[in-house]
Image: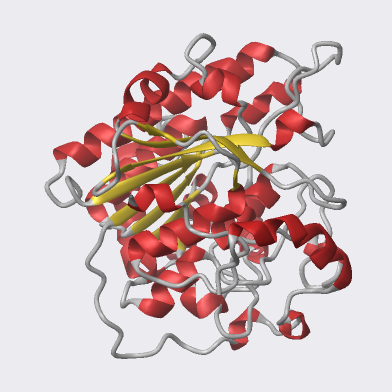
Amino acid sequence: MDLPASSLLDRRAFLRTTALGVAGFSGVPASFAAAPPSGLPGYRGPNVIVVRWGGGARRRESIEPRATCAPFLTHELAKRGVLFPRMEIAQFEGLNTSHGEGTLNLLTGKYDRYQDIGRERADAGFKLLGARFEAKVPTIFEHLRETFAVPDHQALLINGEDRADEEFYNFSNHHLFGVSYRSQTLSLRRYKTWLLRRHLAEGKWDGKELEKQRKELAKLEELDYRASKEQGQGEAIGRFWEDWRGYYGDTGLVNPRGDRLLTELTLRALKQLRPKLVMVNYQDCDYVHWGYLDHYTRAVAIMDEGLKTLVSAVEADPYYRDDTVFVVVPDCGRDDNPFIDVPCQHHFNSRSAHEIFALVFGKGIPRGAVVDKLTDQTCIAPTIGRLMGFKTGFAEGSALEEVFA
């Protein structure tokens, strides 16, 4: 059951003394999960689009009127919904403020001390700077598909090309959920995998080049080591990539890149796949690690442009218009230290790296409300669950009541 907000204060002690109640099952392969039950009711809305405002963005450049690089978010969208300007990521030993962890906090409503699964599982392999995490409790995608008859291509994670490790956050390793309840993922890496399979089927190569491309396909498939290679991405996603190929071709030199790619993928998905639940993992803010502040500020502006495009597309589409809720929330904040060589990091566990925000707007959401109190990142998953009508029984946080006022 969802825990009351006061219980969040006890999380630090809780994590020191006990593991997740079902931790004894965490080693069960996700492929052993039961198949989705038949006879589930159809889903009737609202649709939910989660925009991960990242990777990692401070409040200052996002929602503060005098400093914002996101004018559409700050000056227009904030008036349309409920803004939580003082949302935080909890602080306790072993909790990192980074993109993978923050994304899983949002998807599960639970904090955990994640470590690369390659350190624990020989079949996964360890990769420096490419840590992969597995959620031990179900994600909102799994909860949705366990409750309603929603096909996997209508629950979508849309991911950036530089974060292959985050492509598999669409299902947990929980023994009652797992891969059978997963969402699908749209990304450039997924397109490359589909295209390589298609080229092999078309007999494009022979000899040494054929063997080389087979090895490349095996390498791409190994990243998704928990899913069935025979199952692939499914017919609906296959048709999606066929259309993408017809428009952008095979080279990768024509389609958008970075966060603009994610916006384009989302626009096409809304038209062709009609998803009920989407999470868009914007990420370009993280290029600030190269050392230039304008990489970060420009990325915030690009996210703002992408968000405006998505909102406009939803408003122009009768299928989504008046039946969609947006949730905009960062995966993590960023450091605020003018004396370090590379600005706006997020790995030093500073206070500002724990400071985020959330904006919820759309069908049935109060307009123009600012909730000036501390809230927690783990409240996002139960809020989405309540909006969509499914329970998030493993979440630590509680639904944000002001969204339903």
Comparing 348 with 404, the one in front is: 404
Looking at the figure, which quarter contains the N terminus?
A: bottom right
- Front one among 74 and 86: 86
Instruction: Find the residue positioned furthest to the left.
Output: 318
In percent of width and height, residue 185 lies at: 47, 57
Among all residues in the image, which is located at the extreme top?
Answer: 66
- Tell me if 245 is positioned left or right of 19 in this view: left
Residue 260 coordinates in the image, percent (x, y): 44, 30
Q: Quadrant of residue 309?
A: top left
Identify the residue at horizontal 65%, vertical 58% (top origin).
6
Q: Is residue 308 left or right of residue 229?
A: left
Residue 325 visible, this orientation? yes
How is this picture coloured? secondary structure
Q: Nearer the viewer, residue 20 or 210?
A: 20
Residue 285 locus on image (x, y percent)? 61, 27
Q: Dividing the picture into quarters, in which one does residue 78 lie?
A: top left
Q: Is residue 400 above or below residue 307?
A: below
Vertical comparison of 192 with 140: above or below? above
Residue at 65% over, 38% down: 332
Tell me the quarter of the picture where residue 12 sits. bottom right
